[in-house]
Image (tube, grey):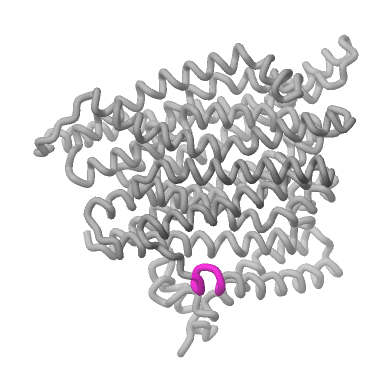
Amino acid sequence: MGAKQKEKNFMVQGSILAIAGVITKIIGAVYRIPLMNIVGDEGMGYYSVAFSIYTVALTLTSYSLPLAVSKLVSARIAVGQYRNAYKVLKGAFAFALLSGGLVALIIFFGAEFIASDIMSMDMSVYALRILAPCILVVALLGVLRGFFQGNGSMVPTAVSQILEQIVNAVASVAGAYLLLQVGLDLAKSSKNQSFGPAYAAAGGTVGTIAGAFFALLFIALLAWAYLKVFRRKMRRDKSRRKESYQQVYKVLFITIVPVILSATVSNISDFVDNALFSNIMAAQGYKKTEYASLLGILSGQYATMINVPLSVATALGASLIPSLVATVQTGSRKQIHQKITSVVRFNMCIAIPCAVGFLVLARPILDLLFFTQDNGTAARMLQIGAISVVFFCLSTVTTSVLQGLDDMISPVKNSAIALGIHVVSLLLMMVVFEWNIYAVVLSKIVFSGALCILNAHTLRGRISYIQEQKLTFMIPTAASAVMGVVTLVVHLLFELFAGEHVATIIAIPAAVFAYAAALVLFGGVTKEEVLDMPKGATLVNICQKLHLFRGE
């Protein structure tokens, strides 16, 4: 396979994960509408607190596993060491069982202490206890996803993610509705009205474990079938280097621990935000139901929207690592630079217009999706936090790049420094300026922006990499500005005659078309790059008819 074909395959695999990520986020946004209707803002507050703790637990056990397994498996497959790659798989399974099982038990039995004494949100204990067993399931799922990614196939991960989210959506809504009734009955007898939202939040987490279990079952069946093919490759393995399980566990530990530390520092920010916000709001005299509702808006409307473009960056980062590891093993520095440039460019071509879209259409999009909610606060949060989409997407990919270059320590240091700046800024904005929930949104911009700067500095020092500016940032920004103007005009015109919801539905595809046309017209994408896309020949033909390519 030639270098160009490999590069194309890498982008295709990355696109598969990115598309799956967007589909799962769309499903997530859709099912959150009935879920929020059932649970309410207060219930979503308990839900978000439980999830922030659950996310930290996942980070400590399974977040690093797909990345670590794919990295180690791809490095061995690149040099034909199939037996050693299989040992990595078995060693990772043992780690997942031990770490996932242990942390699940700690969270389950310590749920009351964590919810009450650490988070000042005692009613989130029910949701937290339901989430605890899911930690083990997701750890095992992460190993199998990493194994397939290390073999260069993102399809099993993509399909399992979509399956997981579909089951999650159905079971979450059903669980929230059923447990809400139980909670309301208990509220009447105990005269504590918070039991209704708390039990509904717990029901909403039922879908998380159901979805993860079905995804694990699906990918385990695929792995069982694929291992027959993989064992044939193992029998043809002529490599003399045979790693012992002791060596495998050592290299797993060396790879996993820095990734865990890096991911923990990055993902713990939500946990820190929730803990600081709840405790400071309580100290400032706010009622528990008030700050629980604000956290519900943050995790419900705001985070759901922000996570859609971020899922693309996460998918690109996951697909980049095995490809980058193989390039480091066999390629030149120039090839490494080209690979990083292409993935960052692709990432920014999506992140920048999404940020502008949120800035321009925040309220209409939220009113379309969350039509039973008062979206005023959520819309202001989304407009304020729009720029964080660009910073989070960029920092996610650059962190993956450093890990793919076998620099596992720098992301930890960078994330720790960014988290420190984040905490100081959050405390300042909440205690001194009393900016309430908007302080959390602004501090996330500070965190992601600081991490981008630190990662860029590290990449420059490590491999002399300096990010290209014009094609990566300037042209997508200019095209996004054109898109923003077109979107506003289209939305205003159709709102006069057809109403806000219809105007939003029409304005979104108009925005996509305007951005794509402006991007090509400004030279942000070449004819050759368009040809490499799905249906590339058709797209080139359309662009030529519209005279969008320069010099034609």
Please tell me in which quadrant of the rendered image residue 335 appears. Answer: bottom left
> Does residue 10 lie above or below 241 as drawn?
below
Side of 551 where 352 appears, left or right: right
Residue furthest toward the top? 189
> Which quadrant: the N terminus?
bottom left
What is the number of callouts on the image? 0
Please tell me in which quadrant of the rendered image residue 276 appears. Answer: top right
Front residue of 60 and 234: 60
Residue furthest toward the bottom? 551
Front residue of 320 and 263: 263
Residue 29 shows up from this direction: no
Residue 536 inside the magenta-drawn segment: no
Which region shows up in magenta?
Answer: 469-475
Please tell me in which quadrant of the rendered image residue 118 appears. Answer: top right
Q: Main secondary structure of the magenta part?
A: helix
x, y percent for residue 502: 77, 61
Side of 82 where 287 appears, left or right: right
Picture residue at 29% right of the left edge, 38% below the top = 73
Picture residue at 48% right of the left edge, 41% below the top = 412
> Does residue 143 lie above or below 529 as drawn?
above
x, y percent for residue 399: 46, 49
Picture residue at 71% right of the left edge, 69% below the top = 487
Residue 394 shows up from this direction: yes
Picture residue at 76% right of the left edge, 23% below the top = 120
x, y percent for residue 340: 40, 59
> Does residue 162 lie above or below 313 as drawn?
above
Side of 206 where 192 appears, left or right: right
Side of 154 where 118 appears, left or right: right
Residue 473 inside the magenta-drawn segment: yes
